[in-house]
Amino acid sequence: MTGGAGVSGDVLIGIDAGTSVIKAVAFDLAGRQIAAAAVPNRYVTGPGGAVTQSLAQTWADCAAALRGLGEKVAGLAARTAAVAVTAQGDGTWLVGQGDRPVGDAWLWLDARAAPTVARLAAQPENRARFEATGTGLNTCQQGSQLAHMARHLPDCLTGAEVALHCKDWLYLNLTGIRATDPSEASFTFGNFRNRAYDAAVIDALGLTAQRHLLPEIVEGTEITHPLSAAAAAQTGLRAGTPVSLGYVDMVMTALGAGVWGGAGDVACSTVGSTGVHMRAVPAEAVHLNAEGTGYVICLPVPGVVTQVQTNMAATLNLDWVLAVGADLLRDFGQEVSPRDLMQRLEGWLAQSAPGQMLYHPYISEAGERGPFVKAEARAGFAGLTATHRFPDLVRAVVEGLGHAMRDCYAAMGALPGELRLTGGAARSAGLRGILSASVQAPVRVSAREEAGAAGAAMMAAVAIGAYPDMQSCVADWVTPLLGTAEPPDPDLVAAYDRVFPAFVAARHGLVPAWDALAAARRFAQGA
């Protein structure tokens, strides 16, 4: 059914199924958070880079989170005006006859498709694919994974009738409808300009014979489907409640945190274990870089998309350097945790001088994917001297996050005019100052606790007519929660501007070293 026929109920529920936890969050119609319930998520690692997740367990956990929310909000079923769902992106969730799973899902963390990505990226058709999707190939994407299955593991596709993403699987269980949204459909198999599948893209992936696996594309701000009787029985909600299919979690989080809305060129970065850097632009203004990296992901706003670059590791680098400190203290009988040391971050930053050395924050064993793709990339310091101490190392690591952020935004065009931050790292004033100076833009932090669930709920709010459009919804749900703009320190701006070219030159120059080290590791492992 279509939205706008009148609102029944005073609560909107946003479901956000991440890689580690599934959350169900209740909001009132004006965007104020009422309550939240969460259930831990589970995935399994296997040989060859396999990372999989049970479809049945994921739905059971989602239903449990909704039941948990019902225990916290009195009369939730009767009060719920609509439900919306978003989830972790990419990956391959195959479903067959009777809407039953066909094996376990391949998650976005799964690396088995790496040889297929290398093969497809080397083909002449790949540039045209990139210019249609705006998205570089990598192992996490459903297109790469399906292409790898079709060529090397065809038994994985036996019995499959539809290829879904995580949120699509949950939507199927909530409504009985097989569908996907415009964001994941277009950056994987389509064109961001018309938000539709593109036959040339599908052919470039070698998946023309698998075209039948791609589901209908549904715009969740315009179309909802009713909660099924079976889902109502499992979740405790009322059958017939409108359900909106949200966009992928990255853009839902950015929408809830303020990636769109307000004057000037606004950008939004999520600085958590990984880093996600996004800017909202008109589709016709997209900057497609020569390297063919990043994503272009549609927003639930007509004609507006997000350009995206993502780091494999952000605060994981900070976790590492603090863990080194904790390990050394433990060896001398001082039992402290990295979290204890995090409380000293501001002091260490104050004790150290800016821009004295470089750190490339490629600490992930999967290498890096933004703004370049290099599985062999590794972290390292440059410029270290005998005078440097632990606070200098900590500062260099944090500055490395800033340089990597600037590297990502530079790959999308000019640096943004304002940076909006979300993620746990945004709580540190010292870290905010370094990031602000790195991208040469004032920083604002959103007070929104659950931005991903909020972004999805905002789509439901528009779909049922609680708001006439997304702009008016943003004015209530997002803008009032943005903190005061914190301008960058001009001295820090100048310091980082002087060393950023060296950061980029060093990462280019390190490629042979990364390759040699990767070969040495393979030799040591007997590969």
Image (cartoon, rainbow, N blue to C red):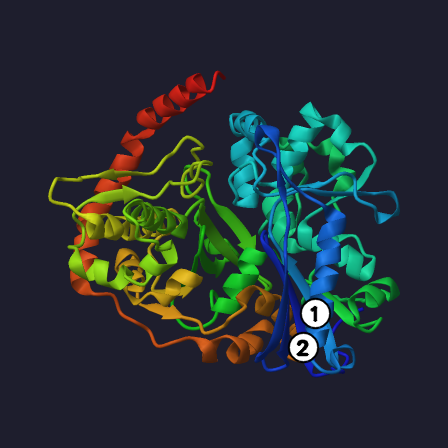
User: Is residue 332 visible from the viewing direction of this image?
Assistant: yes
Q: Is residue 467 left or right of residue 330?
A: right
Q: Residue at x 15, y 45 (%)?
A: 388
Q: Nearer the viewer, residue 335 or 193?
A: 335
Residue with the mark numbered 1: 68
CB-based contact (under 8 Å), mark 2 and mark 1: yes
Q: In the rendered image, which quarter is residue 175 located in?
A: bottom right
Q: Residues within 10 Å of mark 2 (few under 14, many from 20)?
A: some
Q: Secondary structure at mark 2?
A: helix
Where residue 385 sits in the image (x, y, percent)?
A: 13, 40
Q: Is residue 298 left or right of residue 15?
A: left
Q: Nearer the viewer, residue 267 or 367?
A: 367
Indicate which disc residue 72 carries: 2
- Which residue occupies the extreme left position in the image? 387
Q: In the rendered image, which quarter is residue 126 located in?
A: top right
Where residue 266 sits in the image (x, y, percent)?
A: 40, 65
Type of amino acid at the residue the image marks with label 1: Gly
Q: Residue at x 81, y 67 (%)?
A: 227
Q: Could you give the CA–CA distance between mark 2 and mark 1, rounded to whole angstroms? A: 7 Å
